[in-house]
Amino acid sequence: MERSTQKNGLVNFLTLLVVGVAGFAVARSSGSLGGQVAALFLGMGLLVALVSWFQMRLEENERVERLELEELAKCHSATAMFDAKDSEVFPAQRAREQFERFFVPGFSALLFLIQAGGAWFLWHWLSNPATAVAIRNPSTALALFGAFTLVLFLLGRFSATYARLRNDRLLRPGASHLLLDAFLCLAVSIDLGIVWSGSPKADAYVAFGLCALLVLIAVETLVALVLEIYRPRVKGKVERPLYDSRLVGLLSQPEGLITTAAQALDYQFGFKVSETWFYHLFFERALKWLLLLQAAAVVLSTCFVFVDAGEQALLERWGRPVPDRTLLNPGVHAKWPWPIDKAYISRTEQIQTIEVGFTPQEGKEEETVVLWTKAHTKEDNLLVANREPAVEETAAPNTAAAKRTPPVSFVTGSIPIEFQITNLVAWAYNNGDAMALLKHVATREVVLYCLSADMNELMSSGRLEASRALAERIQVAADARGLGARILAVGLQDLHPPVKVAEDYEKVIAATQTRQAKILNAMAEQIRTNALASGQAATVVNRAQSDRIAREAGARAQAALFTNQIPAFQAAPAVYAQRAYLQTFARATANARKYVMLTTNTHDVLIFDLEEKIRRDLLGDLDVPAPKPTK
Amino acid sequence: MKRNPFSLFIGLLILVIFGFLLFSFQVRQSEVAVVTTFGRPTRPITEPGLHGKWPPPIQRVYKFDQRMQNFEDRVTEGQTRERFNVLTSVYVGWRITDPAAFLPKFAGSANPIAEAERKLDERLGNIKSAVVGKHSLSDFISVSDSGTNLAGIEGEILRAIQSEVSSNNWGLEVAFLGLKRLQLPESVSKAVLDRMQAERKVLADKSQYEGEKEASIIRSDAERRAADMVSQAESEAIEIRAKGEAQAAESLAAFKKNPELANFIFSLNALENSLKDRSILIFDQHTPPFDILRGVSTNLLNPSR
């Protein structure tokens, strides 16, 4: 092994050291999660490069030792020295063998622990919501990681080619790690570019992706360690270093995949497809132009902004609003490519809603029936004044003149507030979080309104008026804060007493209904009683009328009859009287039971048993009290 | 060695891009920035646009959102002047006015804006308690719009926090502040809920028994009116009958012509009327027409004998 290889290995190690430290510092200072995970890969590469460089030195020592011995052997053909054992004669060889036998497996095991432990730690660390922070100066971090990419790629490419040409197995692990780290730095650069363009979540996704890659490499290292135990040892055969990951090699030199694919094609088609003009044209010449064209298309796509119906966009050039074109309306607009011009699209005409007065709870918002007696969200208790308490409080004499605090009650409910963005420039540039401020302002107005509103009014007749008044108040407050929003509606439909007392409110409603029912029943009875009484009165009067008529008519008839009877009587007074008597007697006694005493014996005693003739129904309703028991 | 112009171009392009990124930075309309040279703030930037800088570690750029920031402070418990416990929280609007002064005080943390808000929150806790303690509950709650003094309370808290911020030169200004929550402690809330329940019970009972009362009134009124109607009808009936009697009495003049006969006829009528129902009459042989039987042998009545 030549010294240049060793130097190359040392350069690889030192480069990984410098880039690793710098990369970690940049990632930490910018807060890039992807960068920090990539720094672990750089650290692993550093260890691999160090061990491989050390192994190179051992092999170099061994080679020098052999050369020296060969020189000596030429001078002294047979000496006692060559009779000695190999371990005594070849200390450098022995050191290298011991190194490969004990240190390399130990180092590989350590590498596995670092990979597995690192993946586990990073995964938990990334899963913690407190880990993610806003990335500071993404453009600077992007540039630095880009620079790391260039350095690592150039050096890694040189080392990989050098290792392949010289078939140097010990230079390859460090070169593979250099190239892999170059690709990872490129991934971090792209990730930072995406973050810079306004998608901060990309950083976390890249970090998790790198973690998953670390897990794969750890699994490969473990498998290699296990296989190493059962691998047959052939004396004199040059072995691939245990820490030289095949997966890292494949990822760092993806052209190996293309070569494998070409070989598979050759096998399938039965001729050398990889040597055809198409293959050479496509893969060796056109591919890079296609990739360049792809990159150009990406850049070109940032030269146009499409604003949909209902949207508006803010156009900034180098961060400054573009004069006369600050606000872009629906349509296609040309602009300078990113990052010179940036467009921020917002849905301005969309009716948006903020909710005040409750904390949303997952699942509960989908309930189709919303009742007072069942909590549908975590509702806040809003204080309201009671203008008309159920029982008038008696104020102390000395407080009569002073301001008295009214009894307070609670009201709860979700209050949706609908709004539209009317001035996107004001909405975007005046406040850091315009939506949150609008919610604060709206909540304040709701709280203040409730504090001086009457609860009963608020939940009944005054609801519509309160809704209008609140919308006006929130609009005034939003305008004062320069929010550029128009309040469309404030919904108080869900306002109700707290769940704990809601049932009592319903009982009051029920009692009101009961009261009404009782009154209505009484009114029904009133109608019945009055109607019957009216009927009875009419009957009494009618009977009297009829009696009167009968009486008058009877009297008149009797008088007329009498007037006509007088001549008859005068004509034969005795006969007429007797006839009248007998006629009347006959009529009157027609239905009577008659007993006629035809006896002259006045001494006889006649006994009539009239007992059975007593009407039983006269005694039927008599309630005769039971005789009291005698003491 | 063969030079590939394509690779050279791409490499050069990448170098130019990375170099440009290293030596320049953008400040958005919504941002302010501070450039530090070897850690010392040297250039505050308040105008948006493209600006130059030396690459790290010579110069570093710290950018802050210069728009109005807002946050809600923690809910804190305080006592009003009459020792009534209330829970309050406010929202605060603030902005960075001097990035060079703001940087050394807050840029050490991962999120300077959040750190500044945490500091403001700490100060607000004290100030709120002090201001709330100077006011009575009636300044917070009133039955009329003009009854509360909330605007005044908010103004007092705002002036106090503005004074603290300016005296410490935090590089920021508190622009506005508003009351967001006014609540009662849990134990007091429970008592209020109990009172609300009792109040509802009063109203429920009131409704129920007032209903009964009204029903009783309606019923008794109906009965009274019914009795009135019947009694009025009866009195009317008596009057009608009396009129009938009076009218009938006019016919009595006809009977003056022969009072003896009239009385006889009246007697006959009375006799007839009195015997209408089932009666048992016992006559002797002297009573006409049975007197016709007088002197007739009783055997004649029974021919079989």
Image (spheres, grey):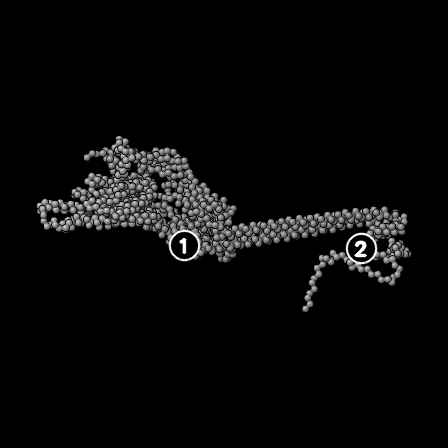
Q: Chain of mark 1?
A: B
Position of the N terminus of chain B, as image quadrant, is top left
Q: Chain of mark 2?
A: B
Left or right of residue B251: residue A422:
left
Identify the residue at the far top of this view: A277
Which residue matches tag 1?
Answer: B77
Task: Identify which residue is drawn at 32% across, 50% down.
Answer: B168
Q: Is residue A259 visible?
A: yes
Which residue matches tag 2?
Answer: B279
Task: Identify which residue is drawn at 65% across, 49% down.
Answer: A528
Q: Is A46 above or below relative to A336?
A: below
Q: Amino acid at mark 1?
A: Glu
Which quadrant holds residue A213? top left
Image mark for residue A443: none
Q: Position of residue A561 (x, y in %)?
A: 83, 47
Q: Position of residue B56 (x, y in %)?
A: 25, 43
Query: Marks 2 and 1: same chain?
Result: yes
* Classed neighbour count for the residue bearing mark 1: other residues with Cα under 10 Å, few (<14), some (14–19), many (≥20): some
Identify the residue at the far right of this view: B295
Identify the residue at the far bottom of this view: A631
- As measured in the structure, the alpha-carbon distance from the residue carrying label 2 to the one carrying label 1 is 103 Å
B223 or A392: nearer the eye?
Answer: B223
